[in-house]
Image (spheres, rainbow, N blue to C red):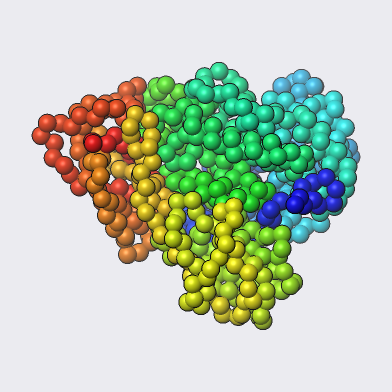
Amino acid sequence: MSHTTYQGLKETVFQSLPLGSVKPSGWLKNQLEIQANGFTGHLDEHWEDVGQNNGWLGGNGDSWERGPYYLDGLLPLAYLLEDERLIEKMKPWIEWTFASQKEDGSFGPSYLKNANNIMDDYDWWQDFIMLKVLTQYEEATKDERVIPFMLKYFLYLKTALLDHPLKEWHEARGADLLLSIHWLYERTGDSELLELAQIVQDQTIEWNKIFNKFPYWRKQTEWNHRTHVVNVAMGIKTPAVFYRQTGDESDKEAVYKGIQSLMTYHGQAQGMFSGDEWLSGTHPSQGVELCAVVEYMFSLENLTRILGDGMFGDILEKVTFNALPATISPEWDSHQYDQQVNQVICNLAKRPWSNGPDANMFGLEPNFGCCTANMHQGWPKFTSSLWMATQDGGLAAVSYAPCSVQATVADGRDIELVVNSNYPFRKEVDIEVNLQEKSTFPLLFRVPGWCSGMEIRVNGDVQQVKTEKGYSRLEREWNPGDRIEIMLPMQVQLEDRNNNAVSVNRGPLVYVLPIGEQWVCVQERKRFHDWEIYPTSSWRYALINDVEFEVEENEEIHHQPFTTNHAPIRLLTKGRLLSNWMMKKNSAAAPPKDPKPYENAPIETIELVPYGCARLRIGEFPVLR
Ligand SMILES: [Zn+2]
């Protein structure tokens, strides 16, 4: 059966809860606070590109994407933490943006429209980001200026796009504009918005066709918006966004085929596909850009919302819990442009990448400053997406990280769920159902693809549940004080990689051999410095075939769990040093197909930690069979 809202826009399987409905707790809240105390809460004080002179504050500095990017993370972070300092920091940007709207409906730094001194060179991209910011702002504050502001802009855009169509970055990223158009349509029902949506779809790169018959099988080196890793990470949601407009099943299928192709030809062990600018193949020493990480997360959150398939939650967790923390320093005061699964040294050196020699260093803006501006959205939007609303007035658990959820359910009552967990570091999740009086509504729980034997108990009784599209459904009358316990058994699972290598997974976490790290400051600034990291221990280990993994849990979850010293959980196994695995072009060579140990090398006990804990690591291992 197909559901439609009004006419012509397919209903999404889940709906996002308004910003602020899901609040972080436990280790996740700590993570957001670390972010607030690091880059996100202080970047404007130390980086001119988003400082007082930014065009989006009326200055004549950067007026393109950097200001809006920064806001796209700063704003949700401020409201999730209810942090007055961050809210005050964010407000002038919003106020300036409102004030900038012209009679014709356009807004933003005005000279930007002819940034290259060519009157015809309209760039819409930065507007798309600011619209995403405004939708979140409206959800958090109910500010009544947002909806008329957006309506006025979209009416302007409907005409303006005929003379100045989408091209280059905005042609690749049209779906991000469609998200805001759909958001507004769902609130106003204004049919002109659907006409605009059609124009935008027609002018956007046909990602549906690209992913249905994926042509980019090899490492790419040429300038091409269709293989630019960030565009691809954003583009993967496009067919599903189109699907809301077309209802065409092949658009939906394109998402599944696209992810499969990306992982086949460019997949990496931490759940990402590579791209040290362009899609870069499966070699574990190719780079993955931080912007691609946070944009893929945002795509997966939208795919979950639109298509309601648990598979997207599996990938979202893998990327969020592994690729995201690994590429940012534990204090959130430096980050990489490109991360590697097998990352044995981070230094200024030429690598077989399209990016520059500083791309894997940790710093303020290694290689290029896009990630410096864009990285902030990762954790806050993930937090907001932990739970979503179902079409029939229930709630769906997309991920089990600790949080609390406020929502209105089927019978119109307001309820609260308090999710206590140390997931993904532990397998137990405990949920308190807080309500004033009895209430009947469904709860959906994601059943991770890696999990067998998941158990749901209510007040101690095991529940029989049906699972569909990766979610178990529990519909019943809930009583004040009901308690749900979920058990997600995690087994070590080895994933086959190229060259007979393996990666080690347990639950949503990828486990790696941490390499001793010596951080060397190469550029000191007042606050955010640049660093190289040199290895202080050997990394050329193979795993021994068929050796058991012993799980060792730390008693407490440290304030920052994503460090090697404070890893909340470790896997103990056996390894042996190899004599034929070497460095090549300043990275670890591909794991040898035929690994040879040193003659007298003992079989050693080695400790693996979660991928996100180690800034130097081996994540793809040869195996001695
Ligand atoms: Zn970037």
In which image quadrant can residue 545 be found? top left
Residue drawn at x 69%, y 37% as measured from the top left: 251
User: Is residue 84 at least partly visible in the picture?
Assistant: no
Q: Does 208 sit above or below residue 408?
A: above
Among all residues in the image, which is located at the extreme top?
222
**Residue 65 placement (x, y as % from top left):** 65, 36
Is 531 situated left or right of 248 in this image?
A: left
**Residue 234 placement (x, y as % from top left):** 62, 37
Residue drawn at x 76%, y 23% as measured from the top left: 121
Residue drawn at x 32%, y 64% as measured from the top left: 555
In which image quadrant can residue 625 be found? top left
Is 494 situated left or right of 376 in this image?
A: left
Residue drawn at x 31%, y 37% as measured from the top left: 621
Q: Nearer the viewer, residue 192 or 482?
A: 482
**Residue 25 placement (x, y as % from top left):** 51, 64
User: Is residue 455 at least partly visible in the picture?
Assistant: yes
Q: Nearer the viewer, residue 173 or 349?
A: 173
